[in-house]
Amino acid sequence: MSKIVFRRLHALASFLVPGLGQFLGGRRARGLGLFGLMLVTLGLVWWAAEKPCLAGSAPVPEPDSGLSGCKSAKTKVLLELTTAISTRYNEYDMLDMAILGLLREGPMHGYELKQRLVELGFWRISFGSVYPALRRLERAEYIEVSPGSGRRKEYRLTAEGKEHFQEILQDEASEVENTSAFRVRLAFFKYMDPETRIEFLERRRTVLRARIASARTSLKRTADRVDRYTQSLMEHGVRSAEADVAWLDDLIASERTPRAAPGAADQI
């Protein structure tokens, strides 16, 4: 079993608590469905580790995978399923973190929260997603509701919510491969300590450099087989990733530059 599988299973284990919380909180269809997927995945782990391959059914192993053909195929299936569930879990995680982070700035009503979430990159967010998330956070006592102006409710962060936000924000196991999730976390970097900020930026840079190397290899391999539009799109992806790496280089250098002590003008 590859290290990637176990890393994603770590996120999958974290998925159990919110999945059960949604189920017990009344969202039975979604909670039961996600919990069921988790059980299926754990079953696949046992299957991949314990069950022998059927005679004559083992596919050809991938080069340098270190696995037999059958084990390699099983690992692929497991990776795809754990990736799907991990992605769903991260979507909830990112939405919760974004709402808690915005409320850390001060109380807001639902409409204002939705608008701010769109600005953060949740382009397709709807009230059908925002209000269930707010109810979930309220049940967990991470936020509290009070009457606002007119008929609007005002949401504010609790002490428990502030602590939970900090835990999600600085979660070392969080993935940096997902561009949208990374950008949401970046929006709240001011609440991180400098060492953690640098660690996240360096991990993201490593991911992008690996993607650039892979894309360049693909460009060389497919140069004679793809049309000029596909070739141009692939080249554009490489240039965009290279620009992001340069941007991350600047951010990391800025983080490592000692900040000047406040001057007399700053203290007035």
Image (cartoon, rainbow, N blue to C red):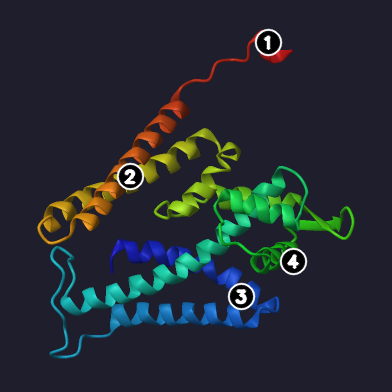
Tell me if mark 1 has few (under 14), some (14-19) or many (20+) residues whose alpha carbon lies within 10 angstroms of its own. Answer: few
* Marks 1 and 3, how far apart at CA: 54 Å
* N-term-proximal mark, 3 vs 4: 3
Left or right: residue 143 versus residue 191 is right
How far apart marks 2 and 4 lie (CA) works out to: 41 Å
Q: Is residue 34 above or below residue 218?
A: below
Using residue 95 as the reference point, say whether residue 254 is left or right of it: left
Amino acid type, callout 4: Arg
Which of the numbered marks, if any, corresponds to residue 20? 3
The residue depicted at 30 percent of the width and 49 percent of the height is 237
Name the mark nearer the viewer: 2 or 3. Answer: 2
Kindly report the distance in space between the C-alpha atoms of the residues bearing marks 2 and 1: 40 Å
- Element under disc 4: helix
Cα separation between marks 2 and 3: 38 Å
Q: Position of residue 159 (x, y in %)?
A: 75, 49
Q: Is residue 188 above or below residue 21?
A: above
Task: Identify the residue at horizontal 49%, vertical 40% (top origin).
Answer: 196
Q: Amino acid at mark 3?
A: Leu
Left or right of 44 on screen, residue 104: right
Name the residue tied to disc 4: 139
Determine the secondary structure under disc 1: helix
Residue sitting at the far top = 264
